């Protein structure tokens, strides 16, 4: 299958812009593009999905096993003409500075993907050749398939850069993109604005032609389309949907405030026989009927606190649902939604659902950032005590009030090594700042579905 990984020399060099431009150009040619994002990012995948017209997936060599990553690629790429993986951070940046663990380079080797390196050329001339040469020599086992120069001042500037690289390096130059404000995606504290936001969504739709035009004018699309993924892509049948004892309906919070789902998490729930029913905590006045469980994802509730707080009928419905003993699993923004109150950075406090007995305040810095090992200390919605899961923490908020609530997780942060008890459990509700990838332990999805089945067939409300 045609495919390659788009990497960068560092974060912020324009990998996402280049990925979207190539995707738009390939779609214009009538090709079906399957996008992927390396690492735990939720935001880029939303933009990939919008431009590709096909749901993007995450691959991650720290959270997922080699087999799980290959399965994600093979299943998601079925029916596609080309797969594109956007890397994360710099090409060799990963879990630590000692090796390539968790890096885009490791993903490229595992999935046998040629690497196209994006460089920010905005303030460089001949020196850019030294950067390319350094990346060529750093890991000879990872030959570069090409480089793309971003934020170039114009054709004359590009010719200077191209001459420098070609006179010194062996890596082909596959084109350039100009410094163009019209193709920039707005950012905020967690990264890019989400693809679900109205203004951003409209801008992305208008952006497709602009991106495709630039790619056609400035990038060597035919040479890019010569690149092949070396992974054996045996056509596989669709996953077998397991038959459950009951037809289980899981409500999925999904709108501008709640959108951070790994698509594979949802796939695994479906594979275990669950029907996923979307609803909006902002816009809907009540929950969909006949739900057996709720999955409340992360997102940006801090950007919509007034709307969330004003939707009192939904907040009441959430409290009643929790009181019924039906399972509720919440991550990060979903946990904020279930808390008593949220205080913004401006100091305004808004009532939330009031399920969890603590308050949350927004901070001006990242809190608990990085990959996380999660050991279940007690049997819970997601599995049995002793089960080890992996996930990611990335948030600008903290619990600001004392609370007495049971915990089910023992966390260890990969960057700092810090350990803490977390995973707050109240009745049949489990909430955490950690975003779990269910393919780290596929039994997670089955356990959650079984908990919903058990509650439906039982008259006992957990305490």
Image (cartoon, rainbow, N blue to C red):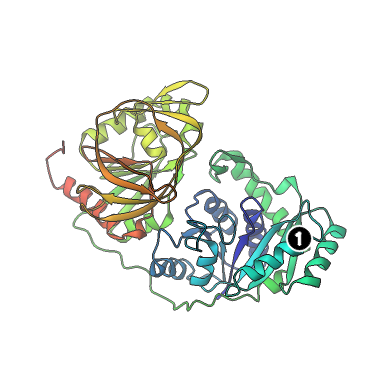
Mark 1: secondary structure: helix
Residue farthest toward the left in the current orientation of the protein: 459
Residue at the spot 31% in from the left edge and 68% down from the top edge: 240
Left or right of residue 230, residue 284 in this image: left
Q: In this view, does 237 lie above or below 14?
A: below
Q: Quadrant of residue 126?
A: bottom right
Q: In this view, does 89 lie above or below 116?
A: above
Query: Whole-percent x and y of residue 316?
Result: 31, 28
Residue farthest toward the right in the current orientation of the protein: 156
Most foreground residue, 123 or 215: 123
Query: Whole-percent x and y of residue 387?
Result: 25, 55
Residue with the mark numbered 1: 128
Q: Quadrant location of the C terminus?
A: top left
Disc 1 crowd, CA 10 A, few/some/many (<14, 14-19, 20+): some
Q: In this view, does 456 lie above or below 363?
A: below
The reply to whether residue 216 is in sight is no
Residue at the spot 31% in from the left edge and 26% down from the top edge: 402
Most foreground residue, 14 or 32: 14
Q: Quadrant of residue 291?
A: top left
Most foreground residue, 266 or 362: 362
Left or right of residue 377, residue 45 in this image: right
Left or right of residue 79, residue 5 in this image: right
Left or right of residue 296, residue 81 in this image: right
Residue farthest toward the front in the current orientation of the protein: 98
The reply to whether residue 356 is in sight is yes
């Amino acid at each position: 299958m045609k495919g390659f990984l788009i990497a960068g020399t560092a974060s912020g060099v324009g990998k996402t812009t280049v990925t979207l431009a190539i995707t738009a150009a390939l779609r214009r040619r009538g090709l079906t593009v399957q996008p992927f994002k390396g690492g735990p990012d939720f935001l880029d995948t939303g933009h990939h999905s919008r431009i590709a017209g096909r749901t993007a997936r995450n691959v991650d060599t720290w959270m997922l096993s080699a087999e799980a990553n290959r399965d994600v690629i093979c299943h998601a790429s079925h029916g596609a003409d080309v797969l594109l993986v956007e890397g994360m951070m710099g090409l060799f940046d990963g879990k630590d500075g000692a090796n390539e663990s968790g890096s885009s380079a490791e993903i490229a080797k595992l999935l046998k993907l040629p690497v196209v390196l994006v460089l920010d050329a905005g303030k460089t001339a001949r020196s850019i050749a030294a950067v390319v040469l350094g990346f060529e020599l750093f890991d000879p086992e990872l030959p570069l398939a090409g480089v793309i120069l971003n934020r170039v001042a114009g054709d004359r500037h590009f010719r200077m850069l191209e001459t420098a690289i070609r006179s010194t390096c062996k890596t082909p130059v596959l084109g350039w993109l100009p410094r163009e404000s019209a193709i920039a995606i707005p950012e905020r504290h967690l990264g890019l604005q989400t693809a679900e936001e109205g203004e951003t969504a409209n801008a992305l739709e208008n952006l497709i032609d602009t991106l495709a035009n630039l790619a056609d004018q400035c990038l060597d699309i035919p040479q890019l389309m010569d690149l092949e993924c070396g992974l054996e892509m045996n056509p596989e049948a669709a996953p077998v949907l397991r038959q459950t004892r009951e037809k289980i309906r899981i409500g999925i919070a999904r709108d501008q405030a709640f959108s951070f789902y790994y698509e594979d998490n949802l796939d695994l729930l479906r594979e275990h026989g669950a029907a996923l029913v979307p609803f909006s905590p902002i816009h809907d006045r009540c929950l969909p009927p006949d739900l057996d469980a709720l999955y409340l994802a992360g997102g940006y509730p801090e950007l919509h606190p007034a709307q969330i707080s004003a939707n009192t009928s939904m907040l009441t419905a959430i409290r009643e649902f929790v009181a019924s003993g039906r399972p509720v699993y919440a991550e990060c923004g979903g946990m904020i939604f279930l808390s008593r109150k949220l205080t913004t950075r401006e100091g305004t406090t808004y009532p939330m659902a009031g399920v969890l007995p603590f308050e949350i305040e927004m901070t001006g810095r990242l809190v608990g950032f990085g990959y996380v090992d999660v050991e279940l200390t007690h049997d819970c919605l997601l599995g049995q005590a002793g089960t080890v899961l992996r996930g990611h923490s990335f948030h600008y908020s903290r619990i600001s009030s004392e609370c007495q609530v049971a915990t089910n997780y023992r966390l260890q942060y990969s960057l700092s090594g810090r350990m803490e008890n977390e995973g707050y459990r109240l009745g049949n509700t489990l909430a955490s700042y950690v975003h779990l990838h269910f393919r780290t332990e596929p039994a997670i999805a089955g356990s959650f579905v079984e908990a919903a089945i058990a509650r439906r067939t039982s008259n006992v409300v957990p305490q």
